[in-house]
Image (spheres, rainbow, N blue to C red):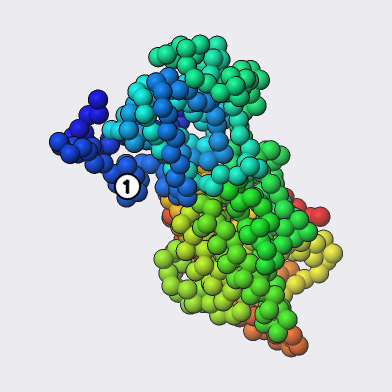
Amino acid sequence: MTEYGKQLTVTETSIPGLVVFDLPVHGDARGWFKENWQREKMTALGLADFGPVQNNISFNDAVGTTRGIHAEPWDKWVSVATGRIFGAWVDLREGPTFGAVFTTELDPSKAIFVPRGVGNSYQTLEADTAYTYLVNDHWSPTAEYSFLNLADETAGIDWPIPLDQVEISEKDKNHPRLAQVTPIPPKKILIIGANGQLGRALRAEYGDAPHVEYTDRSSLDITAPDLEHARRWRDYSVIINAAAYTKVDLAETAEGRRGAWAANVTAITGLARIATANNITLVHVSSDYVFDGTLDRPYTEDDPLSPLGVYGQTKAAGDQIIATVPKHYIIRTSWVIGDGNNFVRTMATLAQRGINPNVVNDQTGRLTFTTDIAAGIHHLLTTHADHGIYNLTSNGEPHTWADIAKQVFALTGHDPDRITGVTTDDYFAGATAPIAPRPANSILDLTKITEAGFSPSGELQSYPGAEAP
């Protein structure tokens, strides 16, 4: 019999993410009423905001009707409309809880959230039972399912009505035993721009995990008009966009301006639309160039945007677009140094060749190693940090470019006094091509990222780019 008057409460189970809700049911002589799904109240109790898109109803005439065990590639919110069911759930996901079992009875005063990859099965305990489930993906014949036999000895489910006395489909009778079930991998992580400096650092960070997919422009063009049809996006949990137009000076030309807006704004708009529609976490890498560099203190995540040039304008526009995605991380960084051509390697090469360069001494900031960016992104995702903007540079005292050049000369065994510091205006004097304005202050405050538990590196000598090539 349905219990009336309970408070809305949640109970964890032995299977991670599988949670049971007690639902308030209000009844009188006319019948009863309940809020079967109430997003605001239920997410406040810790339920994932899973974004249901389809509502299904299963009606069962006879006591003992048994269905399962099915693991679908979507999350489900299961509740009883009328009658009573016995439910059994088995974790079929990769990981240490593979094979874990949980059972309980559900009536109209209870509901359960079933995360993707957890097998579910139901046995009706009353005639004319109907249960409903909300799912966060549309049913598709191409979706990949997994199944477990209802009588699996390893699971050892104690069915209230023995399986030889109930109505079961032939298909469900012939599902494999647990030993033959291939564990369901997590949703995919897509890394875009995987052949660039940051992309290579992300490859090193994530390795060859089968659920991580690496793409470059040859395999996925994020500026293409049919981007939303390029993948089955519901199979992805995270998109990390490591692709961007970064030719700061060229962006000041007519051709470069078009390229910068196409890559840093138009393409970002497409990714944002896809992430929002498919409940994907979108990670976007931004820049100190979204600021004009006139503050006399480090920039925080909350400072207003004030870009000077075209490149900074496109990055600022991209930030605003990404901020509309419900699940997003904007990683704001500066002075990026990665595997390949970069400032540190250039200075080491000049030192080795005996060249005494002029280097800008009126711009101040911190280097950011791509290994730090990759590790910081990984940290935010795995710790489920609050979504939003995070400044992420390498740590330590801020320096000018000339200061850093002197460090590189010293670290490679050369005289740092061979460096001559010059102003930005003097450095670019006589340039015939357009030159983008640079922020004089590129120092980003790291309080938020460190409070989130990530500690960027701070030693230039620890980075292989400091070595002579």
| Disc 1 residue crowd, few under 14, some 14–19, many 20+, Cα 10 Å | few
Kindly tell me whether residue 416 is visible in this rendering: no
Q: Looking at the image, which residue sits at the far right?
A: 353
Q: Quadrant of the C terminus?
A: bottom right
Q: In the displayed image of the protein, which residue is found farthest to the front?
A: 61
Q: Residue at x 36, y 41 (%)?
A: 46
The image quadrant that residue 151 belongs to is: top right
Residue located 66% across and 73% down the image: 262
Q: Quadrant of residue 77?
A: top left
The spot of residue 314 in percent (x, y) is 59, 74
Residue, x 66% and y 20% (percent of image)? 180
Q: Determine the image quadrant of residue 131.
A: top left
Camera-side residue of 195 and 148 = 148
Name the residue located 54 percent from the left edge and 47 percent from the top edge: 138
**In screen coordinates, is 336 left or right of 134?**
right
Q: Amino acid at mark 1?
A: Gln
Percent x, y of residue 129: 37, 29
Q: Is residue 370 left or right of residue 20?
A: right
Image: 32 above or below 95: below
**Image position, residue 313 (x, y; %):** 56, 76
Front residue (pair 454, 235): 235
> Which residue is labeled 1 in the image?
38
Question: In the image, residue 426 lies at what x, y percent?
Answer: 67, 84
Along the line of sight, the residue nearer the viewer: 158 or 431: 158
